[in-house]
Amino acid sequence: MESNIIIKDEYEHLDNCIEYILENVLSKETQQDEEYMQLQDDYNSILINKCHCSALSCLCDVDCNHGGNYVKDSQSKELVLNSEKHQELIYECTSLCACEPEKCVNRLVQYGPRNNLKIIYSDRYQSKGLITTEIIPKGAFICEYAGELLTLRQAQRRMEENDTNQRMNYVLSLCESASNGSRIMNKVLLTTVDPGRKGNIGRYLNHSCQPNCQIKSVRIDCPIPKIAIFSKNLIKAGEELCFHYNEGVIRKNQLTVQGQKGILCLCGAETCEKKHRNKIK
């Protein structure tokens, strides 16, 4: 579902074969099974929960059922993750909330990627990468990892095609656990995105075993979360942006390709795992 929020994103791909999209889009599928129908329903659904603030009394920074996710950084004055809150799930305020968007401190990811990101050719990774041309404070939002939303069956097929044709894999799965309060009744929520054919600036972040970025699940006006990339620490100008492809994002063996080989990791970190799967970037 296309959002009513105006996303500020003026980036574009260097390769004309890749379609630039501002946020996730639903993949097309001719064989629509039950899983795809559920994904389609979720994509076209709207979250109706809203905060209890008003234009006169906005408490989105402290006492609000949505708020407390972000705080103002003392130096840059931009919104960053609240280090005092353990953000497993982030819900941002939407057009259904009465708080003023210009003053609300719980609206960040919905406005799109930060400025001053640059696509480069990374000598270290021997592929395209993404750098920042300005200092990024710790906990700052960088961009969404946006692409086509897939079912597990679609993702499996795409990964097999990529493996056969020796193409880079961009398929990434965000794995969340939902509970109804019982330790026994746990439900796994899986969001699978592929920016290989349609994607945004987020597709260019490379893997690192000691990354300077991290992923957070952020919901705005749709049940399907945005895979939001935040800085893990202060990042200097000119530094390449990377995140750990497996760190809290995908369950082991959740997506596999028969006969797929691990590829040598080039991150150069002291804690390098030497090899990582070619299946999630």
Image (cartoon, helix red, strand yellow):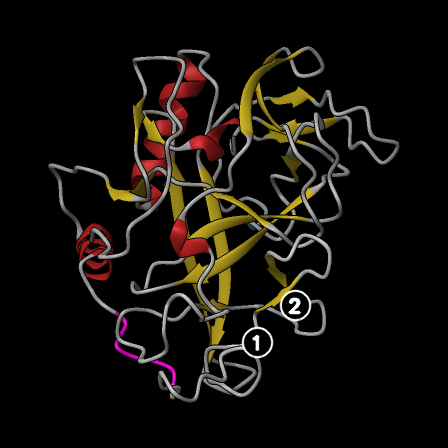
Q: Name the residue beneath numbered marker 1.
A: 68
Whether residues under marks 1 and 2 lie with C-beta atoms below 8 angstroms apart, the answer is yes
Q: Position of residue 205 (x, y in %)?
A: 57, 30
- Horizontally, residue 172 falls left or right of residue 62, namely left
Which type of secondary structure does the marked residue at label 2 adopt? loop
The amino acid pointed to by label 1 is Gly
Query: Mark 1 and mark 2: span between their CA atoms?
Result: 7 Å
**For this rendering, which residue is in front, 105 or 34?**
105
Q: Residue at x 38, y 82 (%)?
A: 51
Say if 122 sits above or below 93 in the image.
Answer: above
**For this rendering, which residue is in front, 80 or 36?**
80
- The tag earlier along the polypeptide, 1 or 2, is 1
Q: Decide: few, some or many residues near mark 1? Use Cα within 10 Å; few <14, some 14-19, many ≥20.
A: many
Main secondary structure of the magenta stretch: loop
Q: Residue at x 40, y 58 (%)?
A: 225
Q: Position of residue 84 (x, y in %)?
A: 71, 73
Q: Name the residue beneath numbered marker 2.
A: 82
Among the 4 quarters of the image, the one containing residue 99? bottom left
Q: Residue at x 34, y 59 (%)?
A: 224
Among the 4 quarters of the image, the one containing residue 253? top right
Q: Give, as a single range, the part of the protein colored magenta.
A: 47-51
- Horizontally, residue 159 falls left or right of residue 18, namely right
Residue found farthest to the right: 270
Residue 171 circle label: none
Q: Decide: few, some or many residues near mark 2? Use Cα within 10 Å; few <14, some 14-19, many ≥20.
A: some
